[in-house]
Image (tube, rainbow, N blue to C red):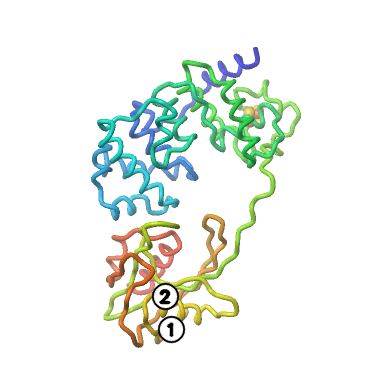
Amino acid sequence: MKTQVLQEKLLKWFTENQRDLPWRENYDPYQVWISEIMLQQTQVKTALPYFDRWMKRFPTLKSVAAADEETLLKLWEGLGYYSRVRNIQNTAKLLIEENQGRFPTDFEQLKKLPGIGPYTAAAIASIVFEKNHAVMDGNVMRVLSRLYNFEGNTRLPKNQAILQKMAEELLPHGQARNFNQAMMELGALICTTKKPDCPNCPVQKECLANQLNVQDRLPNRGPAAKKIAIQVAIGILFQDGKIFIQKRPAEGLMPGLWEFPGGRLEKDESPEMALERELHEELSVKLTKIKPFMTLKHAYTKFQVQLHCFTAEIQSGTLSIKAAQEGKWVCLEELQNYAFPAANGLIIKNLVSRLK
Ligand code: SF4
């Protein structure tokens, strides 16, 4: 009984309150897939301009498959988790070569595609093809934890499995598209992490957390994993009015992005010493005219990084690239043509405002 009431109320609320989003216009599989990949770790309002730019540049699966890496990365610049871009292109190529450019409609088949895990497979299967699979993202976990006063730590796989089962049981068969989106939309707009808007919630009456007034304590996310503090030194090398940049390896963190050379400080090293050592190891050069440019803090994946940035020139040695895929000397204006990690982007902004 309660399940049916929840289903009806949530579906009605979604029909009346859903946001007008471009991938909802006709639920095209390609558009829904790109939106779902972009929305991992990113809010809708941030993803929207990226989505628009992407669709203008790559309106079809075929255009993504044929794209060059630089353009793909540039369009993704700022969204992070850059291996997603490579997976998008690999999936596009695979679908064109092996499936006449069509998406499989089956959850298990979708899950075999590069970069498509259980969440994205369930999202595509249900939102595009109306298959009866419940999606489970952060929004859905929060809504379910509160609706059912589920107190288990949602970071633990065993509790995620319990929530997944609850979501499958709550899913009205034949209406997976709207119901899954209703759960996610409710989490994004009403049942938010901080200050959920319970008085305006369509399922306030049925919500156990609301009845017990414990919504601020749920979901239980356990202790957050502590970030590892690291220090990094990087150098902006100048020569004949140009700046040196290098392309990160094709595998590992931020594959294929461009960056200024440098690396982590070792024990008892000053940032300047680390810069000299790193550039000697990576590029076989000795530096001169080393000057502090800026220091910034930022976080990525599990790291809390303090980034010490210097300007410098090459004193001796012939530059030879050992750690990167390739290197280039470019002028200030050309930097905008390349995709950089977020922290390097901030440094470039500073460089442009100081040097122009
Ligand atoms: Fe979330 Fe409040 Fe609605 Fe419960 S009543 S689902 S806590 S917004």
Tell me, yes or no, if residue 283 can be seen here.
yes
Image position, residue 201 (x, y; %): 61, 26
**Discs 2, 1 touching: Cβ within 8 Å:** yes
Image position, residue 206 (x, y; %): 67, 21
Residue 290 badge: 1
Q: Quadrant of residue 246?
A: bottom left
Q: Residue at x 37, y 76 (%)?
A: 283
The residue positioned farthest toward the right in the image shown = 212
Decide: is 338 above or below 55.
below
Q: Secondary structure at mark 2?
A: strand
Q: Secondary structure at mark 1?
A: strand
Depth order, front residue of 288/26: 288
Q: Residue at x 56, y 80 (%)?
A: 269
81 horizontally vs 217: left or right: left
Residues at marks 2 and 1, CA–CA distance in whole angstroms: 8 Å
Depth order, front residue of 191/159: 159
Q: Quadrant of ligand 1?
A: top right
59 horizontally vs 224: left or right: left
Residue 97 badge: none
Decide: is 308 above or below 168.
below
User: Label 2: few (<14), some or many (≥20) within 10 Å?
Assistant: many
Ligand 1 under 8 Å from disc 1 Cβ: no
Amino acid on which the number 2 mark rests in the picture: Gly
Amino acid on which the number 1 mark rests in the picture: Ile
Decide: is 144 above or below 292.
above
Tell me, yes or no, if residue 15 can be seen here.
no
The quadrant in which the C terminus is found is bottom left
- Give the residue at mark 2: 235
229 horizontally vs 346: left or right: right
Q: Quadrant of residue 253?
A: bottom left
N-term mark: 2 or 1: 2
